[in-house]
Image (cartoon, helix red, strand yellow):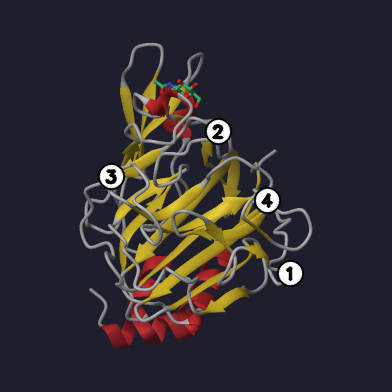
Amino acid sequence: MFSARLFQCLLGMSALVYAGPCDIYASGGTPCVAAHSSTRALYNSYDGDLYQLVRASDDSTLEIGLLSTGGAANVAPQDSFCVNTICNITTIYDQSGKGNHLTQAPPGQAATGAGKNDYDILARASVAPHLINGNKVYGVYIIAGVGYRNDKTTGVATGDEPEGIYAVLSGTHYNTGCCFDYGNAETTNTDPGAGYMEAIYFGNRDVVSSGAGSGPWIEADLENGLYGKASTGNNPNNPSMNFNLVTAMVKGNSGNEWAIRGGDGVSGALTTIYSGVRPSGYSPMKKEGAIVLGVGGDNSDAGAGTFFEGAMTTGYPSDATENSVQANIVAAKYGLYS
Ligand SMILES: *[C@@H]1O[C@H](CO)[C@@H](O)[C@H](O)[C@H]1NC(C)=O
């Protein structure tokens, strides 16, 4: 194992080549407690599976792992397993070691599709091919009715505890429906009121909050509302994220502090969209530590988007740590597959 000092040194010397996003969060003192990706390892040392498929032809399953330790997804087995049938993703594994895997979301209050009385539907597995460092990989393609969740997590922030969240998402697949989210949610699947969520939202829903232009925007779903600043309404400092790939970040500290940051997932640096106090009625937070992907905390299931990777930390990551994570995402070389 690396010593912390050797690790820091490698980090400095090698421009992040030896680190994954969760190694960077750990070296910043804010380790990941959930780490999900369909495209790559989020730790240099991760050598487990990324996700599980089920195919419609015979209901058999297949685990999708990595090309190498710490590397990109190995999707050649998926491509042969899924020939002439439909494959869906059943499970997105947590790489953090905390066991916070994401599976089919259970029924919830606000679902209008299958998830009203039954589990949400699963994402198709082979419809969002992309490249990472020249390797073909697949995103998790969320349409209305699709959702993943874990209501019994370990180590995820609750109450007013600090956390950070990041995700790499498609900048071209989104909608106005509520709500394509990734992050912390209530454990009950019903809306208990303000402050029970702290999640990344991505899309062009222009109902409660909006940003500059026509979207899509990165906002925070704090439950009972999407926020791009300390109140609802328009935040002209929240730019439309018209990139093929988008890095989105939301973080929340104890003591009435939070921030939204984001940028192009292929090049450049992060912009701080908002940093400051919480909306009125949101301090202290009442986080419950469930994790959602593709739906709101009450299982509102009308959102659309494509998820590639994301993680949640314990502790409030510094801007410098998040900037290093963005540099790592750029170095991973996401691109379109044609
Ligand atoms: C597989 O995915 C598609 C699209 O998301 C969905 O329509 C279908 O119901 C899914 N199958 C299952 C068993 O969830």
Write down the residue under mark 3: 188
Closer to the camera: disc 3 or disc 2?
A: 3
Secondary element at image label 2:
loop
- Between 286 and 81, the one lying in front of the other is 286
Q: Residue at x 67, y 67 (%)?
A: 267
The residue singled out by tag 1 in the image is 236
Callout 3–callout 1 Cβ contact below 8 Å: no
Which is more N-terminal, label 4 or label 2?
Answer: 2
Q: Residue at x 65, y 43 (%)?
A: 176
Vertical side of 163 occupied by 74: above or below: above
Q: Write down the residue under mark 2.
A: 143
Which numbered mark, 2 or 4, is in the foreground of this view?
Answer: 4
- Residue 206, how many percent across, how many down? 68, 51
First in residue order: circle 1 vs circle 2: 2
User: Is label 2's Cβ within 8 Å of ligand 1?
Assistant: yes
Q: Assign a secondary structure to mark 3.
A: loop
Q: CA distance from mark 3 to mark 2?
A: 23 Å
Q: Which three-letter amino acid code belongs to the residue tagged 1?
A: Pro
* Separation of residues labelled 1 and 2 (CA atoms): 28 Å
Mark 3 or mark 1: whose residue is earlier in sequence: 3
Left/right placement of residue 296 relative to residue 153 reads: right
- Seen as rendered, the residue at the extreme top is 57
**Quarter occupied by the C terminus:** top right
Amino acid on which the number 4 mark rests in the picture: Asp
